[in-house]
Image (tube, grey):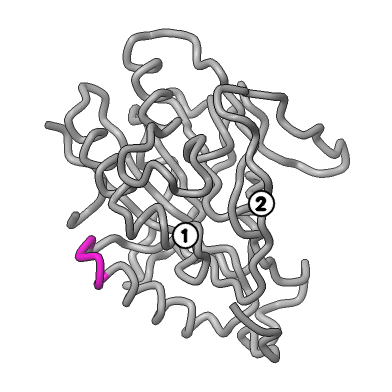
Amino acid sequence: MKNIITTTLLTATFVVTAVIAQPAGMGGKPPKRDKNKEVAEIGEPAPMFSLKDQWGTEHTLKEYEGKIVVLEWFDDKCPYCKRVWGSGLVPKMIDQLGKMDAEVVYLAVTSAANRPKEEIVETGTKFLADLETGTPMLIDYDGKVGRSYGAKTTPHIFVIDEEGVLVYQGALSNDPRGKEGADAETHIVRVVTQLQNEETVKPNYVKPWGCGIKYGKSGDKDKKQGRRKPRGGRGVMGL
């Protein structure tokens, strides 16, 4: 069994924005790229990154060369993320990946800036500790990595092959309402299986669903650590 390194990215969100899922079994086309922006494209090298986790350890995409890398944008305040983790779906999926022949690195990035950074780290750490995952969190408080990948929801999945090429982005599964619970089939396991069998990744895009990521204003450095008035309510290393 290959060891899976999972890093869960936490994106704190107060206002939940639901994104309608594409019907099961349909791939669709990735949104058109803004030519004025550098955003990750399927079939092209994935953007490099260097981020520190909640313990100050630095993680880079370069250090995982030769491995399949999965990025999950995650928010401990998002009901969609709470459901897919709390139901056992994500932990089960990570266990499945660990039993495959391919070596998989499961990472996550927190790109929200609508709360103080310290609070995001604190609540995210507690969420993971309660699930007994021991998962490191990569902090992308300025949102540069999230924007470079075009991450829009939590969860939003990106899969990078052993050569560093982005081969899939989109939904975690075709079960946004959580009706199938831990039994839902994930696109991640499907894509990794296709890569492992040297097959074409198809579909390579499925419209993501979940809560909208609350990025900070571009160029607005830290914004006093995100201290804004709340607007109302509502793999792995150590799994």
According to the picture, the residue beneath numbered tag 2 turns out to be: 152
Query: In the image, what residue occupies the spot 38% across and 8% down?
Result: 198
Q: Earlier in the sequence, mark 1 or mark 2?
A: 1
Location of residue 23 in the rendering, given as x and y in whole percent from the top left corner: 62, 30
Residue 108: percent from left, percent from top:
44, 53
Magenta range = 129-133
Q: Amino acid at mark 2?
A: Lys
Front of the two marks 1 and 2: 2
Q: Is residue 21 above or below residue 163?
A: below
Q: Residues within 10 Å of mark 2 (few under 14, many from 20)?
A: many
Magenta stretch, overall SS? loop
Disc 1 element? strand
Q: Residue furthest left?
A: 1
Pick the front one: 8 or 76: 76
Residue on which the image places disc 1:
51
**Image position of 44 with respect to 136: above or below:** above
Callout 2 secondary element: loop
Query: What label sits on residue 80 in the rendered view?
Result: none
Q: Quadrant of residue 126?
A: bottom left
Locate the N terminus and report the quarter of the image it occupies.
top left
